[in-house]
Image: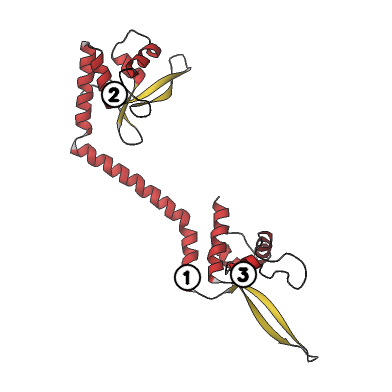
Amino acid sequence: MNELIKVNLNNNQEPVVSGRQLHEALGVKTAYKDWFPRMVGYGFTENEDFCSNLSESTGGRRATDHILKLDMAKEIAMIQRTDRGKEVRQYFIQVEKDFNSPEKIMARALLIADKKIISLEAKIEEQKPKVIFADAVSASHTSILVGDFAKLMRQNGLDFGQNRMFTWLRTNGYLISRKGNSWNMPTQKAMDLGLFEIKETTINHADGHISISKTPKITGKGQLYFAEKLLGEETA
């Protein structure tokens, strides 16, 4: 079948044609800018039957074109009431038959499936660090020290050492930044969210007095919570 006018596929895998190419193929003498609005007046709707587009004109300047669905193109060809219009319409009918053949339908289905698989693989790859980390935390229900959590984050691709981890937690309001006995202790907000627990260790000193050392540890819930935020910041 000779190609009277180029037929492309849009993002929805529907056959479409250029309005300007159709205008030329039909041999219409009226200027395109005057002819096309008259064609639209026969009951076609923008963004449903056609959409506007810019194309290169022969002079190198950008010219307004339109992308037409095949049904609209067929109707416009019929409206012309000329032998050329009839020929173009018959051409579109043959294109449509070929487009709806079992082989072409299967080919399009495979193409769509392939695109979906590629998109899914990309999403899985993007989420992989989060999934790996979540699995690791889920396997261990114990709370860990801030420094150990920083090591886990480093293993997941973030350049976080212990000091930077403490700084991030203070800056974001999860640990107390005020100097004193409560420095680096969880804030009330962090405790209410269940992100930390405090380990108390009794220390017996040589002079006989006893003191209690308090160390913040990140709970399993806190590990997932902070990992999501930190990995999200990294990929944003």
Residue 175 position in % (x across, y down): 67, 66
The quadrant in which residue 11 appears is top left
Residue with the mark numbered 1: 138
Label 1–label 3 contact, CB within 8 A: no
Residue nearest the viewer, comparing 32 with 5:
32
Q: Residue furthest top?
A: 29
* In this view, the mark in front (1 or 3): 3
Q: Position of residue 192 (x, y in %)?
A: 60, 68
Mark number, residue 72: 2
Which residue lies at the image location 35% right of the left edge and 44% below the top edge?
A: 115
Q: Could you tell me how far apart the alpha carbons at marks 1 and 2 are, in whole angstroms?
A: 57 Å
Query: In the rendered structure, which disc, 3 or 2, sits on the residue that comes first in sequence?
Result: 2
Crowd around label 2: few <14 · some 14–19 · many ≥20 (10 Å): some
Q: Amino acid at mark 1?
A: Ser
Query: Which residue is labeled 3 in the image?
Result: 191
Residue type of the residue flagged with mark 3: Met
Camera-near label (1 vs 2) is: 2
Q: Which type of secondary structure does the marked residue at label 3 adopt?
A: helix
Q: Residue at x 23, y 37 (%)?
A: 104
